[in-house]
Image (spheres, rainbow, N blue to C red):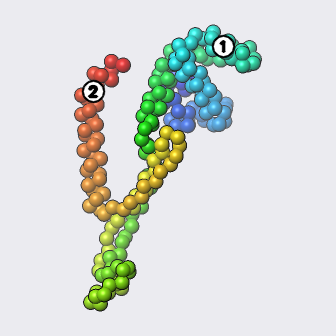
Amino acid sequence: MITKWFLTTDNFDAEASSAYSTIAGSSLIAGQFIDSVDVVKYILEAWYMYDLQLPEIQRDLLLLNCPPDQIERLGTLLERLGPIKKRVYTQYIRFAQENAVLPTFEDINVACDLRAVFEDTVYPIPNIRSIRHTKLLEFRYVVLVEILTEDYHGRTQKLAFQMTEEALSDLQTAFQRASEQLDILKESTRAISTKH
């Protein structure tokens, strides 16, 4: 099942939701499957990174006191996975470079709220007495947003803010425009990305 998963997946993250059906069909429990995939992934990454030969990997495993029958079974598995070692390494290095330098988006929490608008605020207490802090003028819709980011070292940062309905609409439009620009960028650089 592990070999089949490696040969058919586009995402080598065993904790991604795309792996759930394979894990369910495996004789391993989820934790064992993920740990096994991580070990194989590490070997494939090193195999490509250091331009190793399969016998060199098997020799290193022998030096680590792995039983010969397990080394032979792993060698059979690695022979089948050899053709995808570059893809596995590429995903590893891409993740490292995409997540370096700046924090990345991890989660977002959104809540809609109804905000009461009173004639005056509670503080500071005004000198003018013609307006009352107890007089309700209207209600306004507000969207409360909490964005969580994480840096390369696993440190989480939180940004919380509120938006009016109009600001939410502007943000949606801005994301749509950014998506259109990204499509144009992808189209104009397609020749560069296909060379590699």
Residue 125: give x, y in percent of width and height: 36, 84
Identify the image quadrant of residue 29: top right
Residue 22, placed above or below residue 127: above
Q: Between residues 163 and 129, which one lies in front from this camera angle?
A: 129
Residue 121: give x, y in percent of width and height: 35, 79
Residue 175, placed above or below residue 185: below
Mark-to-mark CA distance, 1 and 2? 41 Å
Identify the image quadrant of residue 129: bottom left
Q: Which residue is found at the position 53% from the left and 33% from the top?
A: 13
Residue 64, placed above or below residue 97: above
- Mark 2 neighbour class, 10 Å CA radius: few under 14, some 14 to 19, many 20 or more: few
Q: Which residue is found at the position 63% from the left and 11% from the top?
A: 56
Residue 144, placed above or below residue 122: above
For the N terminus, the quadrant is top right
Residue 179: give x, y in percent of width and height: 28, 41
Amino acid found under the numbered disc labelled 2: Thr
Image side of residue 177 versus residue 11, left or right: left
Q: Which residue is found at the position 47% from the left and 27% from the top?
A: 93
Residue 151: give x, y in percent of width and height: 48, 43
The residue labelled by disc 1 is: 58
Amino acid found under the numbered disc labelled 1: Gln
The residue labelled by disc 2 is: 189
Image side of residue 162 versus residue 106, left or right: left
**Helix, strand or loop under label 2:** loop
Q: Which residue is found at the position 26% from the left and 49% from the top?
A: 174
